Amino acid sequence: MNFFAHAALAHELRADPAFVLGAMLPDLCGFARVRLASDPGGALGAGVRFHHASDAAFHAQRVFVARCGELSAALEARGVRRGPARGVAHVANELLLDGWLAREAGVPSTYRAALKCAGELLGTSDAAPSLSVALDPVCARLVAAPLPESYADVAFVCERVERALASRTFLALAQGELLALAPAVARASEACASWAPAVLADVRSATRAFEREVA
């Protein structure tokens, strides 16, 4: 799952910015290219554990895997190489899920609250002090960005997917392959509503133990 879906599901369990930030923290560290070396403890640490549990359940979900396969096949049929097609399919479906969630359920208040107070929350945790410094610009960019609402826009998703894969030698899209993105991603966007509720329900069921941890 992408960072917003983690935040949205975490908010359902506990409307606490620290827990919601923890649920996004592994992804935020990835954006900043830093490593979360230790458990930050407290609500942040619980959020990190929730992130990993929900990710494991999500990526094992057969419906999501099948949808990625369908989008990959559609891209290959339009001339995209197999590696980039598979990369696009996975990233695009995660972003489209964020857009669907934002459109259907709205953006929980704790999402931006967590990003805005990330420095304070990290500074008082057991995490390395340098982590707060590294994540400050990432969190500021996300607060200012038109996210997650713009993930419901196909053109925006295509641009983000292209950017996300550009630095990956075997996944980057060639110039001639870019024209295949919009029609295939548009069809995947239309299909999102048919699979998202069931997939998220399965993730919620798989992470039910966290209801006790965050109570």
Image: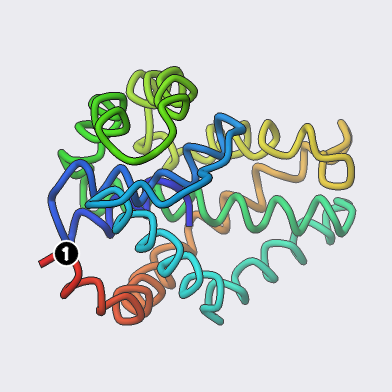
Closest to the observer: 12 or 128?
A: 128
* Among the 4 quarters of the image, the one containing residue 136: top left
Report x, y in % for residue 171: 82, 46
Residue 93 in the image: x percent, y percent?
A: 55, 56
Mark 1 element type? loop
> Up-down: is 85 above or below 191?
above
Count of labels shown?
1
Residue 27 percent coordinates (x, y): 49, 44
* Horizontal arrangement in the rendering, residue 62 relative to residue 131 (left or right): right
Query: Which quarter of the picture shows residue 147?
Result: top left
Q: Quadrant of residue 6?
A: bottom left
Q: Position of residue 168 (x, y in %)?
A: 81, 40
Q: Nearer the viewer, residue 114 or 127?
A: 127
Q: Residue at x 85, y 56 (%)?
A: 83
Q: Residue at x 45, y 63 (%)?
A: 52
> What colour scheme does the image use?
rainbow
Q: Is residue 122 above or below residue 152?
A: above
- Residue 190 vs 133, above or below: the answer is below
Mark 1 residue type: Val
Quadrant in which the C terminus appears = bottom left
Q: Residue at image x 47%, y 24%? A: 130
Q: Alpha-carbon neighbours of circle 1 within 10 Å: few (<14), some, or many (≥20)?
A: some
Q: Is residue 87 above or below residue 73?
A: above
Whether residue 34 sits left or right of residue 77 in the image: it is left
| Camera-side residue of 9 and 50 | 50
Q: Which residue is mark 1?
A: 214
Q: Nearer the viewer, residue 176 or 66?
A: 66
Outermost residue toward the left in this view: 215
